[in-house]
Image (cartoon, rainbow, N blue to C red):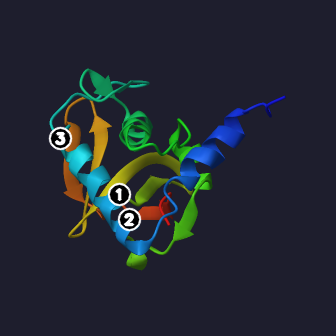
Amino acid sequence: MAAKTTKSNKQKINSDKAKKSDTDSSAIRNEIVEYALKFEGNPYVWGGTSLTKGADCSGFTQSVFRDKGIMIPRNSRAQATGGKRVSIKDIKPADLIFYGRGGTINHVAIYIGNNKVISASNAKTGIRVTKYDYRKPLKAVSYID
């Protein structure tokens, strides 16, 4: 009888796909960044997960990573507790950067390199590229080894 695949098992199994050699890791990171950038200018929709019709910040990150076979949680706070914590000074492309107020995370973005991130910011600006420190980052996490 096959073992039951639970949601947490599935996340672990799928995040294991990102554990590759440095060369593979770099390629996956580049693929994630290139894929995310395809959706720049698309709309922000609170609660959305559609990269074309609209996504919120965590729906955007989840959908981009899912397309590359990496399953991450749905909301930004849960995304911040997964993966491996990395120092802001050591971030690499495709790492997630988290922002918030009073220590409470309320936004997530994908680091794309050159001190920039892409995220689904708000209904006015949609999915856009900004400097990573346009707000004070609270934390960074990598789902790719």
Answer left or right for 65 relative to 73.
left
Q: Is residue 93 visible?
A: no
Q: Which amino acid type is marked by label 3? A: Lys
Disc on the earlier residue, 2 or 3? 2
Disc on the earlier residue, 3 or 1? 1
Q: Quadrant of residue 30?
A: bottom left
Q: What secondary structure is found at the residue carrying circle 2?
A: helix
Mark 1 surroundings: few (<14), some (14-19) or many (≥20) residues within 10 A: some
- Tell me the residue at 47%/61% (across/down): 144
Q: Front-most of 58 and 103?
A: 58
Q: Work out which residue is located at the far bottom of the displayed protein and give it.
A: 89
Q: Work out which residue is located at the far right of the displayed protein and give it.
A: 1
Mark 3 surroundings: few (<14), some (14-19) or many (≥20) residues within 10 A: few
Answer left or right for 59 relative to 85.
left
- Tell me the residue at 29%/62% (across/down): 132
Q: Work out which residue is located at the far front of the displayed protein and give it.
A: 1
- Tell me the residue at 22%/28% (across/down): 43
CA separation, marks 2 and 3? 21 Å
Q: Nearer the viewer, mark 3 or mark 1?
A: 1
Q: What secondary structure is found at the residue carrying circle 1?
A: helix
Q: Is residue 129 visible?
A: yes
Return the x and y of residue 97 as percentages of the image width and height: 42, 58
Return the x and y of residue 12 as percentages of the image width and height: 64, 48
Say which residue label 3 marks. Answer: 38
